């Protein structure tokens, strides 16, 4: 049995079986998957692609908020970052699939999407409205990009707090070298930072041009903190109007 399985409270306490069913409104994405992604005639409506391969089993959906935002979701019932099946040996690396799907954002923009601007976010249970895992694929906020550029030299390959808060919240950061996301960010979070507390965290993955002499990523993670009003909605680091590239004013309220 893997160390991660032993860490997860759902398995240790049998809490999952006693968790009440979420309200119908929080099942909207799951119903969309069943209706539009698994339709007999193939993907339809906002569902753009279905990948049924055993090592993937994911779908890509155009989010209704923002012109450039897309969602990568499991085909199977997976509630979110707290779900034990995400940490089992051989589980799909949904972040790697989401990184590949950023090409959809680039097509929607009609211009190149620089690596440093591309971002993937997964919210905590407290920072989301839907109980089907969904990774937000969209642009990074300009102010967050500025902080990461300024802090680039201080971000190493071990988790450590950023010297400057992002959106008023404390974020842990670590660099990850490599052109593609071969390592699973969720495993890196659970193994090296969150442990059994993984369901209290939100994560954003940002592409970077220079990590240890080549392309890579920065992983950003924040923990729920009611005292500071932080619900670990890591999506707060994204800009669904992609202002850094379009110059448009982001007048949308944050959507979880």
Image (cartoon, rainbow, N blue to C red):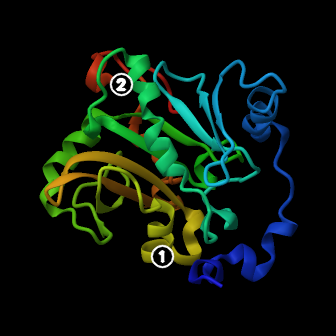
Would residue 46 appear left or right of 246 to someone viewing this image?
Answer: right
Q: In this view, does 29 lie above or below 190?
A: above
Residue 235 in view (yes/no): no
Question: Image height check: is 68 above or below 154?
Answer: above
**Residue 19 lies in what quarter of the image?**
bottom right
Looking at the rendering, in which quadrant would you find the C terminus?
A: top right
Measured as percent of width and height from the top left, residue 244 is found at 27, 26
| Viewer-proximal residue among 11 and 100 | 100
Residue 134 — which label?
Answer: none
Residue at (19% x, 41% y) in the render: 146
Residue that carries the numbered disc 1 in the rendered image: 191
The span from disc 2 to disc 1 (Cα, nearest Å) is 32 Å
Left or right of 256 on screen, residue 152: left
Residue at far front of view? 53
Mark 2 / mark 1, whichever is N-terminal: 1
Which residue: 80% across, 67% down?
A: 16
| Disc 2 secondary structure class | loop
Q: How crowded is mark 2: few (under 14 residues within 10 Å), some or many (20 or more)?
A: many
Residue occupying the point 67% across, 53% down: 54
Q: How far from the left and from the top, in percent, is residue 166?
A: 32, 49
Q: Residue at x 47, y 61 (%)?
A: 184
The residue nearer to you, when weighing 56 against 227, is 56
The residue labelled by disc 2 is 242
Q: In which quarter of the image is residue 106?
A: top left
Whether residue 134 can be seen here: yes
């Amino acid at each position: 049995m893997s160390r991660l399985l032993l860490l997860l409270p759902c398995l240790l306490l049998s809490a999952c079986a006693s968790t009440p069913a979420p309200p119908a409104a929080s099942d909207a994405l799951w119903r969309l998957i069943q209706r539009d992604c698994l339709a007999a005639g193939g993907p339809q409506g906002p569902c753009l692609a279905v990948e049924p391969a055993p090592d993937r089993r994911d779908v890509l959906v155009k989010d209704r908020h923002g012109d450039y935002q897309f969602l990568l979701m499991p085909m199977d019932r997976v509630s979110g970052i707290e779900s034990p099946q995400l940490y089992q040996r051989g589980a799909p690396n949904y972040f790697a699939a989401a990184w590949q799907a950023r090409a959809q954002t680039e097509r929607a923009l009609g211009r190149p999407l620089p690596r440093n601007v591309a971002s993937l976010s997964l919210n905590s249970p407290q920072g989301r409205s839907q109980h089907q895992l969904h990774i937000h694929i969209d642009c990074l906020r300009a102010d967050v990009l500025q902080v990461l550029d300024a802090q680039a030299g201080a971000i190493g390959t071990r988790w450590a707090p950023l010297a400057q808060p992002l959106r008023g919240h404390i974020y842990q950061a670590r660099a990850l070298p490599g052109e593609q996301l071969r390592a699973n960010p969720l495993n890196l979070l659970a193994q090296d930072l969150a442990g059994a507390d993984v369901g209290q965290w939100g994560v954003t993955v940002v592409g970077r041009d220079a990590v240890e002499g080549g392309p890579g990523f920065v992983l950003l993670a924040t923990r729920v903190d009611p005292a500071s009003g932080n619900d670990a909605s890591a999506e707060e680091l994204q800009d669904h109007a992609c202002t850094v590239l379009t110059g448009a004013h982001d007048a949308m309220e944050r959507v979880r």
